[in-house]
Amino acid sequence: DCPSKTHRPLLPDWLSYLNTPKPRDGRTYVMYHGTTGANAGSIRNNGFRRSSNGMLGPGVYLSRDLEKARRYPIDHPDEDRVIIKVKVNVGRVIVIKYQNHHLQQTWSSNGYDSAWVPPNCGMVNSGLEENCIWDPSRIQSSGVCSDHCRREDLLYRSVLGSGIYSDDHR
């Protein structure tokens, strides 16, 4: 298993982070996707599209960790970053917890619907979890937070709208 280092900022007393256990097969979770304002409009109008590549190969990259989504797109101005809140049925999940895993790029052609990178396992610099969903039809958008939201506003709105810091979404 991955070490349990903590690289997250402190939250208000009434919030807590997910323990981030492995997403369970067939369950539905609230997740987040960080993107630009223009891309958010395209996603709203046309739905999510699978990326052609990435650390886990083609797919839609999401996280149950709002802090992870808040950082994307990397090297893009904060004023044009948008976070899309979604619900995802993860289907059959594979855990990829080290670089050069034999299914890191090919999990989707080996019977898995999603790939999950655990937090703090050395796969990503941030140490935050990441999910890759092969089939965009597994994803239902449930809202967009404005590009001008402060981090505290994002957390507050998300928590009030759902039990995102619970692992028990169906």
Image (spheres, grey):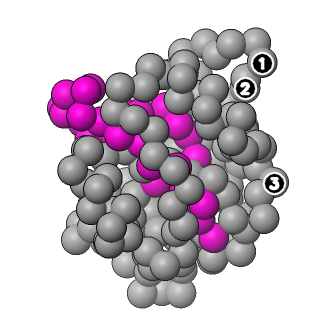
Q: Quadrant of residue 150?
A: top left
**Residue at the (69%, 65%) spot, across then down:** 28
Residue 18 seen in the current view:
no
Q: Position of residue 84 (x, y in %)?
A: 45, 49
Q: Residues within 10 Å of mark 2 (few under 14, many from 20)?
A: few
Q: Earlier in the sequence, mark 3 or mark 2?
A: 2
Residue matched to label 2: 16
- Judging depth in this view, the residue of 77 and 90 nearest the camera is 77
Q: Nearer the viewer, residue 25 or 107?
A: 25
**Is residue 167 shown to the viewer in this render?**
yes
Q: Quadrant of residue 54?
A: bottom left
On whether residue 80 falls in the magenta region, the answer is yes
Where is mark 1, residue-wise?
14
Q: Which residue is mark 3?
A: 168
Where residue 89 appears, as percent x and y from the top left, is 63, 70
Q: Which residues are magenta?
A: 62-89
Measuring from the top left, give residue 17's x and y in whole percent.
68, 30
In the image, is 138 to the left or to the right of 61?
right
Q: Tell me the kind of residue under disc 1.
A: Trp
Query: Disc 3 or 1, which lies upstream in sequence?
Result: 1
Residue 125 to residue 83: above or below: above
Gap in angstroms between the C-alphas marked 3 and 2: 15 Å
**Mark pair 2, 1: CA separation:** 7 Å
Amino acid on which disc 2 is placed:
Ser
Element marked by disc 2: loop
In what element is the residue under mark 1? loop
